[in-house]
Amino acid sequence: MNIIKVNHLVKEYKKIKKEKGLKGAVKNLFVQNAEYIRAVDDISFEIEKGDIVAYIGPNGAGKSTTVKMLSGIMQPTSGEILINGISPQKERKRVVRNLGVVFGQRSQLNWNLRLGETFDLLKRIYQIEDTLYEKNVKMLDEIFGISEFIDTPVRQLSLGQRMRGDLMAAMLHSPEILFLDEPTIGLDVEAKYSVRKFIKEINARRQTTIILTTHDLGDVQELCRRLIIINDGKIIEDGSLDDLVDRIAPYRNLIIDFYHPTIIQHPKAELISVDEARSVYKFRKDEITAARLIEDISRTAPIKEVGLLEAKIDDIIRTAYHQGSQNDH
């Protein structure tokens, strides 16, 4: 079941072009030359209930603008958004009750209150029933261990503790959809682990649909079943990370250390370098597996050690950005 539908979404900003110099300043008083910039340029996609989707792109690609329109904060220039069949622009209050939003660089916690007091305040704002509130606090504490610092003033929390508090605050009213904008930015390894664990568990326990914008590709690899890449306001990729890797980087490199210097050719692999007893083979993943290649070569000469070099995920994503930009021009 599709919980989010986006059809031909456009967001334009008006930018006034000002002429330079004294003459230009005078002219600007009477004549305004305006140009329209498309931050989001005719995008469409659907997201099913329970999906964890990475929505990524370079800075200025249109990610945050899209999330703001999805959550009803911003009005689109044209196009349609439906959250559970309801428009967040036309019925924002109804939609917001079913959304949780966390912005990694902006906290929704009240710095002047203890963390527990902030949760109590949100309970009243969202009008959460006592039974549901207590149930959610207990469940979220099991994931986060938040009781250790629930009586600490928010301003005294570490960055990792504050992010855990923000995530818990976003889930107190049991939203079906969670928007996470850079949730692991600036966090240490332990705090990132905690946030990723939360995302996995809340998705598994509640079937919460999660849209994640991030520059941390570790988040994408570990969490997301689907990847939507946006660049210059347009969607340039939409599919699984594995499919993207297979298409952009179909080759792998196999490093084989023999006991003695030797040169062995293989019909489905290119021998790209030989350095004494070490040979490096390049092969297509869809034509032969590494295991089969090793097995074939080992019939000719005994193998001491093997290693496999995969393309780096960040290199693959950068290539996708670059290809998307070239296709637009």
Image (tube, helix red, strand yellow):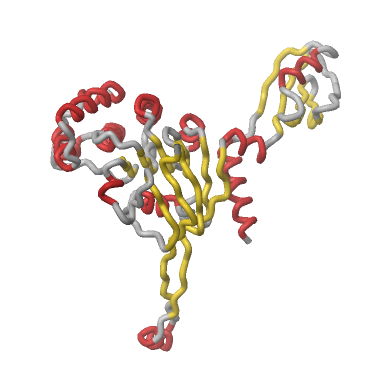
> Residue 164's x, y, as percent?
29, 32
Residue appearing at x 26%, y 23% in the figure: 139
From this view, report whether residue 164 is shown above or below residue 3. Answer: above
> Residue 47's x, y, as percent?
46, 41
Considering depth in this image, is 292 or 172 the residue closer to the camera?
172
* Quadrant in the picture for residue 206: top left
Residue appearing at x 42%, y 78% in the figure: 18
Using residue 36 as the reference point, say whether residue 266 is left or right of it: right
User: Quadrant of the image for the C terminus?
Assistant: bottom right
Residue appearing at x 37%, y 33% in the figure: 208
Considering depth in this image, is 200 or 192 the residue closer to the camera?
200
Using residue 114 as the reference point, say whether residue 294 is left or right of it: right
From this view, report whether residue 18 is shown above or below residue 161. Answer: below
Total marks placed: 0
> Residue 34's x, y, as percent?
44, 76
User: Quadrant of the image for the N terminus?
Assistant: top left
From this view, report whether residue 7 is shown above or below residue 52. Answer: below
> Residue 99's x, y, as percent?
31, 42
Considering depth in this image, is 76 or 182 the residue closer to the camera?
76
